[in-house]
Image (tube, rainbow, N blue to C red):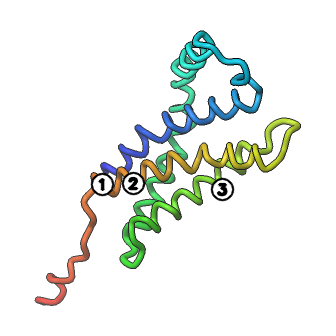
Amino acid sequence: MKRYLIFGALSPFVGGLLLLFTTSYLSGYWHHTNLMEVKKFFIVLFKSLQYSYLFGLLPALMMAAIDEIICHIGRIGPVVRMLIVGIIGFAAAAFMYSNRGADMGSEQLVLYGLVGLVPAMLSSWLAQKFCAPVAPKATEQASA
């Protein structure tokens, strides 16, 4: 249950932040920046945060389910699990977002892919840190 809370609380926020940064970067917003532009960026971030959670909660919970399934595979360690979840998040976000607009290229693919990769790996790492691993109950089967 903690895993789902971590993914549900953290992933939409980080993903929304990265998505807003990526779209503003690709539009040329950061070429001539001053303090007022940064202030506008954070105002837009907090005004659009509700939509980040609205549209990002279900994908975050799906990534949590994938992370939990992989967690129960004994031979896969935490680093490999984070990489698998990150690659799935990268592929999903790159597929969903990188085909937007007339500009399609490797820069868009990588930047939009990072929108899925970073929250997935960060949440998986925190879930590993704060969730106790589920050990198989082999002692009960051996005593029977």
Q: With respect to residue 104, does 79 lie above or below?
A: below
* Label 1 Cα neighbours within 10 Å, binned few <14 / some 14-19 / many ≥20: few
Distance CA(mark 3)–CA(mark 1) = 25 Å
The three-letter amino acid code for the residue at tag 2 is Trp
**Amino acid type assigned to the residue bearing label 1 in the image:** Lys
Image marks 2 and 1: residues in contact by CB distance under 8 Å: yes
Which residue was labeled with disc 3? Answer: 91
Per the model, the C-alpha gap separating discs 2 and 1 is: 6 Å
Q: Secondary structure at mark 3?
A: helix
Mark identifier at residue 95: none
Q: Nearer the viewer, residue 35 or 121?
A: 35
Classify mark 1: helix, strand or loop: helix
Q: Label 2, on which residue?
A: 125
Q: Residues within 10 Å of mark 2 (few under 14, many from 20)?
A: some
Q: Residue at x 55, y 13 (%)?
A: 39
Q: Is residue 47 left or right of residue 135?
A: right
Instruction: State the residue at coordinates (58%, 53%).
Output: 89
Tag shown at residue 129: 1
Q: Give neighbour class at mark 3: few <14, some 14-19, many 20+ (Cα, 10 Å).
A: some
Q: Position of residue 96 (x, y in %)?
A: 70, 46
